[in-house]
Amino acid sequence: MPLFDFIDKLIREHGSSSILKDHLQLIREQAQKEIADLKREHADEIRNLKTKHAEEVAALNRQLSAPQQAERCEFCRKPSAEVVEITPHENSQFAMMGIKIYHYRCSSCEKTFTKQKNSLTR
């Protein structure tokens, strides 16, 4: 029987003080049980939220720590070229538009090459 229904029943009943005492004791025990259940549910929910949060943080950290995809080498075609240096374009008008020269070195064949890229859309 739900707690408030039990209290309503107790209010409507007329009986001795010993019956009233027993009823109040039952209400107290039921209230303590319901409070314990709610505390347990709350603790479980907090634990689930912390686990979910930790998993989301770990996934974001994995994304952040994942290496950027290496550029494909123009000579050996392996995806092992890494940026060595980035310089502004020699042409000042292109440089003003944000075009830069990316200097690469391939870790497989050891050759170097350059590419022009717009730094604003990269």
Image (tube, rainbow, N blue to C red):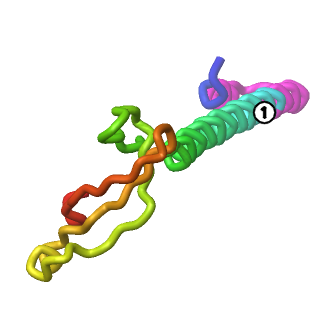
**Quadrant in which the C terminus appears:** bottom left
Q: Which residue is mark 1?
A: 36
Please provide percent x and percent y for residue 112.
39, 53
Total marks shown come to 1
Residue sitting nearer the eye, 52 or 60: 60
Amino acid carrying mark 1 in the image: Ala
23 to 50, vertically: above or below: above
**What residue is rendered at 67% in x and 37% in y?**
42
Residue ID at (69%, 34%): 38
- Give above or below for 6 relative to 60: above
In the image, 11 versus 37, the foreground residue is 37
Residue at 18% x, 72% y: name it: 98
Q: Is residue 30 left or right of residue 8?
A: right
Magenta residues (range):
6-28
Is 10 on the left or on the right of 67, as rendered? right
On screen, 25 above or below 68? above
Decide whether the magenta segment is chiefly helix, strand or loop. helix
Residue positioned 21% across, 65% down in the render:
120
Taking 59 as reference, is 37 above or below it? above
Nearer to the camera, 65 or 4: 65
**Front-lying residue, 87 or 9:** 87
* Percent x, y of residue 121: 20, 59
Q: Secondary structure at mark 1?
A: helix
46 on left or right of 90 = right
